[in-house]
Image (cartoon, coloured by chain):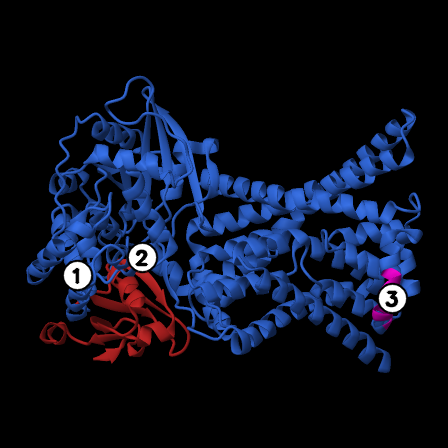
Chain colours: A blue, B red
């Protein structure tokens, strides 16, 4: 049966990564494909990071917006290709992640599946194993977080569990690199057949056995390769719509009707099937797991008493956020300033060197302003993002982020969102690009779309830098208060737009909020390091390339046709053309041009002011009345997101229509708010 | 049976029925909310989401979701049903 599956894998070719000859029958340095499966929060990614480090390849699962990570590990002349499956609680078709995980195991039949389990909640996290054992690939069970289990007073005997299950069981503390070598040995013992693999598989309730046999007989001729027939029958009984469609596509009408009649009669079987799996787990762990005495209060309970409290928890969250921002700007601010100076010097040096070579002026200007300027912008923002992501990665890895989601759920509910949208929106303070990408963690398509549309209203680090500089120039002593109010205004606008979209546009099912609160544990520096690395890499790839291209375009528009005189350039013409709109906000055309260039990257506004006004910090206050100055800042804060964010909005929503609606709404909102501030302010 | 949302912190209910679509039921079943399973309420402030403890794991539920989980207040009630 196994060989047949291999055949299927090559012909299907749905999964992108390459592999060589596989398995025990091939010679030389063979590739062993190992799929890592596990529920969310079991430390699966820590294991993956420990094993593969920087060999990781991060992409998307074919045709899906779900992240796919693969990586290599060399072990005793074997090249182990690890495929990190999405974290899933079960293998039903409840979510894209679950479909990806089970399709991968069935269609690609990896040589070994490693099922990672949280030793601190053995019963619950073994549920996925109960499902994995029904699929053809052999399974190694890893009991991770043995240290957390011990801390919660849970004692586990892996040998006893191994004897009960008939599969290799490996205890592990991945954060301390304990048990990893044993796991690799266990994987190889399945590949070379030295482990007597005789899994005890879960059975279903006696009362359902007959129905299941009936279904197996009924569908056996209509189950396509490589699906195992008993598994298909069981999934039908569980009410799995995807599997039902697979069978019904092939079955004749009379069989279809028979299947439907059986399923209708046993509509509630899903609960019994799950119940039977839990009963099986209970039998398996009875001898192997000793739970603590009732009443023992673990670390998690003590921390949660404060951190999930409606009042103290909110206070703690605000303190944590203040800490994150202080840390980010205190540490990264000076680095950023230093990098900016360095780049300015470098650009100046490059320009004079190029003109000394006798190259035309426009070329040296292109290199120093367009190329180095554009790339420099990306580089100078990297330290801020790195420290911000490190702080968030730390909070995520300790388990705190789920508490933040819980505390904010009440508020998010009013916007038609729930707590899970909090994390992506928080990322937005660093950069809107990862914020939009981060919306992937939300299961409900509607809540995900809403999060994507609202994310640009979170002021990103570049926007905050611009508003801080302009605020200081325009409002002097009062700048702090002004900037604070502007951030608050953005969040109020976010809430208002959320309520509006939720009530008027995105009608439909409310988002379901079911979320696990993992046990607190010590974070792992490697996990955080790779989290930062991958987010920065995504930023550099997505935002970097777009910003570079766009800054070249802006350079072109502001250099030509008047050979460097921006006052006569294309972009100035555009600015003059829309000046009537600017007058409504009390803003002259150069200010509009500066705001327009922020579409490329928010920090461009400052650079453009520098080009247009020279010492703009001295000039701007003389040009703008107080209401106009405020209108400028309000407009800048609410204006459409940068082009990199728009690009990922399209990518993640999969819809130009929604992207256009989101951007259009912000354009209207920023204009209306800017005009209102100026007009009302002028009356006072 | 009463809804899980009505239990106060510390109280234990035994899962009776789950009211919702197939996906909702299937998701909760996978998380261990199967008939007869004891659920202890950890946090419930009468409004907003609640936290329960199920099979050793802590799960946060929106109030709407918690209302759709009906529980028996005694193990005996659960086995009779």
Q: CA distance from mark 2 to mark 3?
A: 55 Å
Measured as percent of width and height from the top left, residue A423 is found at 51, 58
> Do callouts 1 and 2 point to residues on the same chain?
yes
Pinpoint residue A487: horizontal percent, then vertical percent: 67, 65
**How dense is the environment of label 3, judged by Cα within 10 Å: few (below 14), some, or many (20 and up)?**
many
Lower position in the chain sequence, tag 2 or tag 3 = 2
Q: Quick check: A676 above or below A653?
A: below
Mark 1 or 2, closer to the camera:
1
Left of B5 or right of it: where is A313? right
Residue A9 placement: quadrant:
top left
Mark 1 and mark 2 in contact? Answer it, CB < 8 Å: no
Q: Quadrant of the C terminus of chain A?
A: bottom right
The answer to whether one can see residue A435 in this image is no
Residue identifier under label 3: A579
Residue A237: x and y in percent read 18, 61
* Residue range highlighted in magenta: A575-583
Q: Where residue A665 sits: x, y (%)?
A: 65, 69
Chain label for disc 1: A
Residue placed under numbered mark 2 in the picture: A93
Q: Secondary structure at mark 1?
A: helix
Q: Are marks 2 and 3 in contact (CB under 8 Å)?
A: no
Q: Is residue A291 above or below residue A494?
A: above
Give the label, 1 or 3, closer to the camera. 1
- Horizontal side of A314 relative to A383 (left or right) equals left
């Amino acid at each position: 049966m196994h060989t047949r599956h291999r055949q299927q894998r090559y012909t299907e070719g749905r999964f992108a990564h390459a592999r060589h000859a596989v398995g025990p029958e091939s010679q030389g340095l063979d590739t062993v494909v190992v799929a890592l499966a596990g529920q969310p929060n079991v430390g699966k990614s820590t294991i993956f990071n420990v094993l593969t480090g920087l060999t990781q390849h991060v992409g998307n699962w074919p045709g899906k917006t779900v992240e796919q990570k693969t990586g290599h590990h060399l072990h005793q002349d074997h090249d182990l290709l690890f495929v990190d499956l999405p974290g899933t609680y079960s293998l039903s078709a409840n979510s894209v992640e679950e479909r990806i995980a089970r399709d991968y195991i069935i269609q690609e039949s990896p040589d070994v599946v490693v099922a990672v389990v949280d030793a601190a909640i053995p019963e619950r996290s073994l549920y996925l194993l109960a499902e994995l054992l029904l699929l053809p690939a052999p399974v190694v069970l890893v009991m991770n977080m043995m240290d957390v289990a011990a801390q919660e007073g849970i004692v586990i005997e892996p040998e006893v569990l191994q004897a009960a299950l008939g599969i290799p069981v490996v205890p592990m503390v991945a954060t301390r690199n304990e048990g990893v070598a044993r796991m690799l040995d266990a994987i190889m013992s399945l590949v070379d057949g030295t482990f007597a693999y005789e899994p005890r598989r879960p059975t279903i309730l006696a009362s359902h056995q007959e129905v299941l046999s009936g279904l197996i007989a009924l569908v056996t001729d209509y189950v396509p390769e490589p699906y195992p027939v008993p598994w298909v029958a069981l999934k039908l009984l569980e009410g799995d719509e995807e599997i039902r469609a697979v069978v019904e596509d092939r079955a004749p009408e009379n069989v279809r009707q028979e299947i439907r009649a059986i399923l209708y009669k046993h509509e509630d079987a899903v609960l019994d099937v799950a119940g039977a799996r839990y009963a099986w787990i209970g039998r398996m762990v009875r001898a192997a797991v000793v739970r603590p005495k009732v009443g023992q209060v673990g670390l998690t309970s003590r921390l949660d008493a404060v951190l999930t409290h409606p009042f103290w928890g909110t206070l703690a969250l605000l303190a944590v956020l203040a800490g994150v921002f202080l840390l980010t700007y205190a540490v990264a601010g000076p680095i950023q300033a230093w990098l900016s100076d360095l780049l300015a010097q470098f650009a100046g040096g490059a320009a004079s060197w190029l003109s000394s070579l006798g190259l035309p002026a426009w070329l040296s200007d292109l290199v120093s302003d367009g190329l180095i300027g554009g790339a420099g912008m990306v580089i100078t923002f990297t330290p801020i993002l790195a420290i911000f992501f490190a702080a968030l990665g730390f909070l995520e890895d300790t388990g705190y982020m789920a508490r933040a989601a819980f505390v904010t759920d009440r508020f998010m509910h009013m916007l038609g969102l729930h707590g899970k949208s909090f994390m992506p929106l928080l990322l937005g303070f660093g950069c809107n690009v990862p914020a939009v990408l981060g919306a992937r963690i939300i299961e409900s398509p509607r809540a995900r779309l809403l999060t994507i549309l609202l994310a640009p209203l979170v002021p990103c680090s570049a926007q905050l830098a611009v508003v801080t500089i302009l605020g200081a120039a325009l409002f002097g002593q009062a700048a702090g208060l002004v900037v604070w109010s502007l951030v608050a205004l953005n969040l109020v606008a976010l809430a208002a737009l959320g309520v509006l979209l939720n009530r008027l546009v995105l009608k439909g099912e409310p988002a379901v909020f079911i979320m696990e609160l993992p046990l607190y544990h010590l974070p792992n520096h490697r996990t955080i390091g790779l989290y930062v690395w991958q987010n920065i890499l995504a930023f550099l790839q997505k935002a970097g390339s777009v910003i570079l291209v766009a800054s070249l375009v802006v350079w072109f528009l502001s250099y030509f046709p008047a050979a460097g005189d921006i006052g006569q350039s294309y972009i100035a013409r555009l600015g003059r053309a829309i000046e009537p709109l600017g007058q409504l906000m009390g803003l002259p055309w150069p200010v509009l041009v500066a705001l327009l260039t922020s579409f490329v990257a928010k920090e461009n506004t400052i650079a453009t002011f520098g080009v247009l006004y020279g010492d703009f910090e001295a000039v701007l206050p003389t040009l703008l009345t107080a209401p106009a100055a405020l209108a400028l800042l309000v407009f800048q804060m609410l204006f459409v997101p940068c082009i990199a964010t728009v690009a990922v909005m399209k990518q993640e929503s999969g819809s130009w229509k929604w992207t256009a609606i989101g951007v259009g709404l912000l354009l209207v909102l920023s204009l209306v708010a800017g005009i209102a501030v100026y007009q009302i302010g002028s009356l006072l | 049976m009463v809804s899980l949302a009505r239990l106060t912190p510390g109280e234990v209910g035994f899962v009776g029925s789950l009211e919702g679509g197939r996906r909702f039921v299937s998701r909760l079943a996978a998380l261990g909310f199967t008939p007869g399973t004891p659920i202890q309420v950890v946090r419930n402030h009468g409004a907003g989401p609640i936290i329960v403890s199920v099979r050793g794991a802590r799960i946060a539920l929106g109030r709407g979701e918690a209302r759709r989980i009906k529980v028996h207040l005694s193990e005996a009630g659960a086995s009779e049903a």
